Image: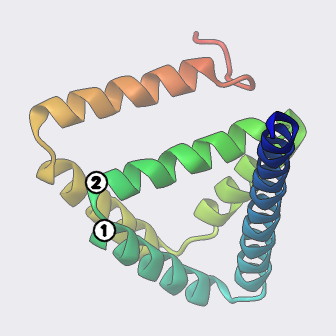
């Protein structure tokens, strides 16, 4: 009986690990498919898609948003430094290719978002951003 229980527990653990691995693999494929889809769009279509995703993000609860941020941060930390640098470069290129109107709209949205925050939230956000910027492996030394 004891050996049977040990075997059952071991089988459960193995099944759990394989399910987690499958979930990670599925998530990676979904992310890659979304990335490919975004690459095939025009800059205007990408901007519209980003706007839709921001709207969806705003509809989520603060806990869900925090979980998504943590997941993305974890994903970025698991990337190789070269891959992370390429992604940042690409994101910077996308930002630079925005039209002046798109840039103005994005700044307006960010200002509104910050205005909606309480002073404590703004202070905490600035502190988190500063810490992340300082702890980035590819961070440039301060002047």
Q: Secondary structure at mark 2?
A: helix
Q: Residue at x 75, y 52 (%)?
A: 16
In depth, the one of 22 and 8 nearer the eye is: 8
Locate residue 139: give its quadrant.
Answer: top right
Q: How many marks?
A: 2
Quadrant where the N terminus lies? top right
Residue drawn at (72%, 66%) of the image: 27
Q: Position of residue 81 (x, y in %)?
A: 84, 34
Q: Residues within 10 Å of mark 2 (few under 14, many from 20)?
A: few
Task: Please give left or right for residue 122 compared with residue 98 in the image.
Answer: left
At 84% from the left and 42% from the top, the residue drawn is 10
Q: Residue furthest top?
A: 143
Residue 9: quarter of image: top right
Q: CA distance from mark 1 to mark 2?
A: 9 Å
For the view shown, which residue lies furthest in the front direction?
1
Find out whether the residues at labels 1 and 2 contact each other: C-beta distance under 8 Å: no
Residue matched to label 2: 62
Query: Which image quadrant is residue 130 in?
Result: top left
Q: Is residue 46 left or right of residue 124?
A: right
Q: Which residue is mark 1?
A: 58
Quadrant of the snapshot with the C terminus: top right
Q: Position of residue 128 (x, y in %)?
A: 40, 27
Residue drawn at point x = 35 percent, y = 76 percent: 55
Towards the viewer: 33 or 36: 33
**55 over 129 or under it: above or below:** below
Depth order, front residue of 5/29 = 5
Mark whose residue sits in front, 1 or 2: 2
Please, is residue 60 above or below residue 137 in the view? below
């Amino acid at each position: 009986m004891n050996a049977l229980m040990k075997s059952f527990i071991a089988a459960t653990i193995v099944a759990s690990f394989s399910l987690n691995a499958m979930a990670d693999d599925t998530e990676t494929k979904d992310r890659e498919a979304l990335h490919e889809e975004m690459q095939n769009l025009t800059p205007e279509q990408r901007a519209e898609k980003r706007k839709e995703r921001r709207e969806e993000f705003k509809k989520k609860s603060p806990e869900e948003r925090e979980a998504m941020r943590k997941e993305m941060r974890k994903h970025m930390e698991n990337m190789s430094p070269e891959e992370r640098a390429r992604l940042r470069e690409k994101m910077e290129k996308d930002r630079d290719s925005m039209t002046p109107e798109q840039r103005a709209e994005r700044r307006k949205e960010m200002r509104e978002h910050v205005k909606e925050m309480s002073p404590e939230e703004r202070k905490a956000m600035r502190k988190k951003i500063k810490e992340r910027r300082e702890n980035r492996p590819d961070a440039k030394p301060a002047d």
